[in-house]
Image (tube, rainbow, N blue to C red):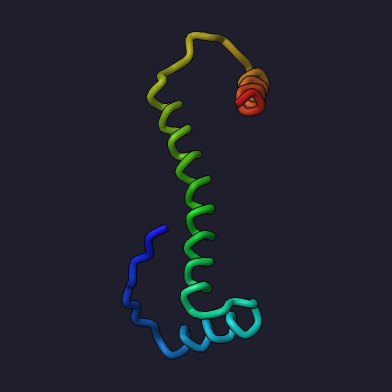
């Protein structure tokens, strides 16, 4: 995997925090800790973006012509999720 060098400006307190995380969290250096934070952010946002896309798909699909109760709708959604 190719790597790209970045320049980053942080405050003194942020630098101290990173150093503390390296000392206590088992990270080898600043870059390793920052890559860890980026991976956590990617994971969190992946779930958010998946949910956002599903909601948008629901809006775009329009109003259903089926007459179903809320319980039936929830059950269908759970069944659909479990079958993916």
Please tell me whether residue 43 is drawn above or below residue 81 in the rendered image.
Answer: below
The quarter of the picture where the N terminus appears is bottom left
Q: Mark yes or no: residue 70 visible.
A: no
**Is 69 placed above or below 84 here?**
above
Q: Position of residue 52 (x, y in %)?
A: 45, 39
Would residue 9 appear left or right of 80 to someone viewing this image? left
> For residue 8, what is the image quadrant?
bottom left
- Is residue 38 visible in the rendered image? The answer is yes
Could you say where residue 27 lies in the image, as x and y percent from the top left? Answer: 59, 76
- Which residue is more in the foreground, 65 or 54? 54
Disc tally is 0
**Residue 37, how many percent across, how many down?**
51, 66
What residue lies at 47% left-to-right and 32% top-to-bottom?
54
Residue at 63% x, 20% y is: 76
On screen, 35 above or below 20? above
Q: Image quadrant for the C terminus? A: top right
Residue 79 in the figure: left or right of residue 57: right
Residue at figure coordinates x 54%, y 86% from the top left: 19
Tell me what residue is drawn at x 33 percent, y 71 percent: 5
Q: Is residue 80 left or right of residue 29?
A: right
Give x and y (percent) for residue 78.
65, 27
Above or below, 49 relative to 14:
above
């Amino acid at each position: 995997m190719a790597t790209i060098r970045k320049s980053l400006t942080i405050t003194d307190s942020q630098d101290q925090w990173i150093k503390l995380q390296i000392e206590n969290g088992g990270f080898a250096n600043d870059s390793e800790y920052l890559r860890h934070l980026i991976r956590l952010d990617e994971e969190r946002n992946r779930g958010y973006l998946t949910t956002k896309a599903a909601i948008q798909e629901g809006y775009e699909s329009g109003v259903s012509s089926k007459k179903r109760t809320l319980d039936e709708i929830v059950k269908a959604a759970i069944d659909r999720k479990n079958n993916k």
